[in-house]
Image (cartoon, rainbow, N blue to C red):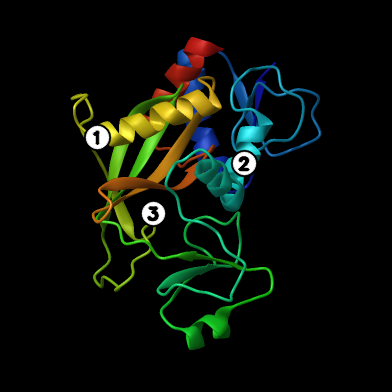
């Protein structure tokens, strides 16, 4: 009988890539499902529902990373840099980002706002806003067992570069970086070590990270317990899972 990998609609394609690599490395059959009515699952991939036979990515971690404000509050409470989410509109810093949702991905529902008039044209009762932080560059780090396994830099690929760009998979190419030299990205490695202490080792996730030139430091933009995976990165995840499951 196939072992179950529980996922959701948005993360289904990446869960299938992971399944393919797990079947090769584990030598077993796995079934990717969105059905939340089974008694047991072998692995959660971005879905916190149901019973669980393994020890990877607890429901708490999945739920926290799925909610951008929860994850932001968690990071800020532990002394890490990240955009702060606001509902108070008595004092607004421009430029800012209005966020229609705390759980959307791919830049959906995010609006760049430069002045008060535009702000109140977009603002809704259940929305949040964050200060726009200027980043010299942005990264995607894949973290397996508390260690940085892969790192990509986001390179803008559209013809027009806006004044306040939102970098995601629709607007950027992700270029693999060489992280074999442990002296590179030392500050980033230290941040990931802090997260390892806070979250433990039995988990996997990706971080979107921005480097602010003025502060000479990294901001964690968001975390994702079910990141987009191509075949090669899925192989890294499958090898990690084989070692701990």
SS at badge 2: helix
SS at badge 1: loop
Point out the tag, 3 or 1, that comes first from the N-terminus.
3
Coordinates of residue 90 in the picture (x, y in percent): 58, 76
- Tell whether label 1 touches label 3 (CB within 8 Å): no
At x 65%, y 40%, the residue is: 63
Q: Is residue 93 above or below residue 102?
A: below
Return the residue nearer the eye: 120 or 149.
120
At x 44%, y 83%, the residue is: 115
Return the residue nearer the eye: 110 or 71.
71
Residue corresponding to mark 3: 169
Residue 21 left/right relative to 77: left
Coordinates of residue 92 in the picture (x, y in percent): 50, 74
Coordinates of residue 22 in the picture (x, y in percent): 50, 21
At x 28%, y 52%, the residue is: 215
Q: How far is disc 3 from disc 2 in space, using C-alphas?
A: 22 Å
User: Could you tell me which quadrant the C terminus lies in?
Assistant: top right
Q: Which mark is residue 185?
A: 1
Name the front one of labels 3 and 1: 1
User: Could you tell me which quadrant the N terminus lies in?
Assistant: top right
- Tell whether label 2 touches label 3 (CB within 8 Å): no
Name the front one of labels 3 and 2: 2
Q: How far is disc 1 from disc 2 in space, using C-alphas?
A: 26 Å
Q: How far is disc 3 from disc 1 in space, using C-alphas?
A: 22 Å
The image quadrant of residue 178 is top left
SS at badge 3: loop
The image quadrant of residue 93 is bottom left
Q: Give the residue at the far bottom of this rendering.
A: 117
Residue 50 in view, yes or no: yes
Q: Which mark is residue 64?
A: 2
């Amino acid at each position: 009988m196939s072992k179950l990998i529980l996922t959701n609609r948005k993360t289904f394609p990446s869960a299938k890539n992971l399944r393919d690599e797990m079947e090769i490395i584990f030598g077993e059959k796995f079934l990717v499902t969105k059905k939340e009515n089974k008694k047991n699952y072998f692995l959660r991939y971005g879905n916190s529902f149901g019973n669980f036979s393994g020890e990877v990515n607890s429901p708490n971690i999945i739920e926290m990373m799925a909610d951008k404000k929860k994850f932001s509050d968690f990071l800020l409470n532990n002394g890490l840099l990240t955009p702060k989410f606001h509902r108070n509109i008595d004092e607004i810093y421009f430029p800012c980002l209005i966020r229609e949702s705390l759980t959307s991905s791919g830049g959906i529902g995010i609006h760049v706002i430069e002045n008060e008039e535009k702000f109140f044209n977009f603002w809704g009762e259940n929305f949040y806003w964050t200060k726009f932080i200027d980043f010299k560059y942005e990264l995607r780090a894949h973290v397996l067992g508390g260690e940085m396994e892969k790192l990509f830099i986001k390179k803008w690929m559209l013809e027009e570069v806006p004044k306040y760009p939102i970098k995601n998979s629709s607007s950027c190419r992700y270029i693999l970086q060489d992280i074999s030299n442990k002296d590179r990205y030392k500050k980033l490695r230290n941040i990931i070590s802090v997260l390892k202490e806070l979250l433990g080792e039995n988990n996997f996730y990706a971080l979107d990270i921005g480097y602010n030139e003025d502060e000479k430091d990294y901001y964690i933009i968001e975390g994702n317990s079910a990141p987009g995976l191509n075949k090669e990165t899925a192989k890294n995840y499958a090898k990690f899972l084989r070692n701990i499951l």
